[in-house]
Image (cartoon, coloured by chain):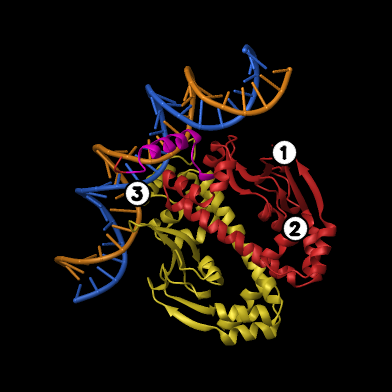
Chain colours: A red, B yellow, C blue, D orange
DNA sequence: ATCTGTCATTAACATAAGTTAATGCATCTG
DNA sequence: CAGATGCATTAACTTATGTTAATGACAGAT
């Protein structure tokens, strides 16, 4: 059943012939990650892409002093990876961690390379996926660059209402580049503001 | 001669058969933009990608109060576009402006769609390009999110020494999400710091 | 029911960065 | 040459956000 959903997820990006989808399915490995478990640790080279069948993962940076900065969250039916590291084969500056018990398909880079040589549909698929990821990133960049902390939070709630439910507040703060204490203050201010008429 | 360089630039991303490169060349239109001229204005749908043969362009957002935020600079031999708008056909939140007198090749989206149907090399090309852009964006995100203003400037100088020469300081400030006055202060502080031994 | 750990809130305080405005210094133009 | 323009610097001041630490709420475990 996960496989059918995987096929669905593949085809949602661009049409993949049945035979190709099957080939992929037959070569992925399923992996279960408990809450808090790392799928990739900063410094390692990322050798796979992933598909999230169940659960929720986050991708984050850490700075020297140990502070973590969330970069993305990925939930059911999404593909994710430490993309830069996988593509460049350089050690990742990112870590990937399960936020909830998660079931993921592991798609090794070597398999992807084989796919690209097997059938041109995969280049198109890879193109579309990269384009989608790029658009996501652009929206996020806009969020971080143009808006102040309070506005960023407001937009986040609007854009990802579901994640806002599923995640603890301090993880959202970290995604928005805001200190968790500041976020709490912001929420508090908002509660007073919403209607200028009182 | 621009065409040969265009072929070079194409092949630097991934191998494109001669016939395909020629087809592209024969269908692009060359456009000249004077300093300050807009190639795309916020609110318009972006209908083309571009290749910069000569000059320097910037892509930027503006906020309601008119402040501008530089998103990217593109110089000789680089491809650029208001990618999200072009892909989604939604009005662009970005503007594109020539910072120096620039000569660019216009690659209409309709042409790109035709390329994708003509020959699979273009999907691969598009994949590689999107991947490269994604990696660039990821590095930038890391820059903005993890580092304080002073550090951002230091890294910028290191990463883009040439741009640092070519651009006025306030444009760099805008790229780094720093107020130009603050950047000047930072430069001043740095001048005092570099050697802890005095 | 009590203990434990996790997370959110609040307050007092510190600091980085933004704002405004004046000044200086080139470069260009008539 | 004089004036205008565009940009960088500097200073005085304001504001947003980070820091630390104490308190409180809640959920899960024993």
Mark 3 Cα shell of 10 Å, populated few (<14), some (14-19), many (≥20)? few
Magenta region, residue range? A175-195
Membership of A10 in magenta stretch: no
**In percent of the image, x 51 and y 68: which residue is there?**
B85
Q: Measured from the top left, where is residue C15 in percent x and y? A: 41, 33
- Are the residues at dot 1 and dot 2 in contact (C-beta closer than 8 Å)? no
User: What residue is drawn where x is 66% and y is 40%?
Assistant: A99
Disc 1/disc 2 C-alpha distance (Å): 23 Å
- What residue is disc 2 on? A6
Nearer the N terminus, badge 1 or badge 2? 2
Q: Quadrant of residue A69?
A: top right
In this figure, which residue is indicated by the disc labeled 1? A37
**B133 relative to A85, above or below:** below
Q: Could you tell me which chain the residue with mark 1 belongs to? A: A
Of circles 3 and 2, the one toward us is 2
Q: How crowded is mark 2: few (under 14 residues within 10 Å), some or many (20 or more)?
A: many
State the image coordinates of residue B50 (x, y, percent, origin top left). 52, 74
How packed is label 1: few (under 14 Cα within 10 Å), some, or many (20 or more)? some
Choose between B96 and A160: the one closer to the eye: A160
**Which residue is located at x 82 percent, y 63 percent?**
A22
Q: Where is residue D7 in the image (x, y as percent from the top left)?
A: 34, 59
SS class, disc 1: loop
Chain hosting mark 3 = B
Q: How far apart are marks 3 and 2 (CA)?
A: 52 Å
- A190 in magenta: yes
Which numbered tag is attached to residue B181?
3
């Amino acid at each position: 059943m996960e496989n059918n959903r995987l096929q669905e997820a593949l085809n949602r990006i661009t049409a993949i012939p049945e035979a190709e989808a099957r080939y992929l399915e037959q070569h992925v490995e399923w992996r279960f990650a408990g809450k808090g478990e790392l799928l990739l640790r900063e410094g390692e080279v990322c050798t796979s892409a992933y598909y999230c069948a169940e659960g929720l993962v986050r991708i984050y940076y850490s700075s020297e002093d140990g502070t973590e900065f969330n970069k993305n969250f990925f939930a059911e039916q999404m593909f994710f990876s430490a993309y830069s590291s996988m593509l460049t084969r350089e050690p990742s500056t990112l870590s990937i961690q399960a936020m909830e018990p998660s079931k993921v398909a592991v798609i090794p880079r070597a398999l992807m390379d084989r796919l690209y040589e097997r059938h041109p549909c995969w280049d198109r698929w890879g193109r579309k996926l990269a384009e989608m990821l790029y658009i996501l990133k652009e929206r996020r960049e806009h969020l971080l660059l143009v808006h102040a902390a309070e506005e960023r939070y407001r937009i986040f709630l609007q854009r990802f209402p579901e994640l806002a439910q599923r995640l603890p507040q301090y993880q959202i703060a970290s995604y928005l580049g805001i200190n968790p204490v500041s976020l709490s203050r912001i929420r508090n201010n908002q509660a007073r503001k919403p209607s200028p008429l009182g």
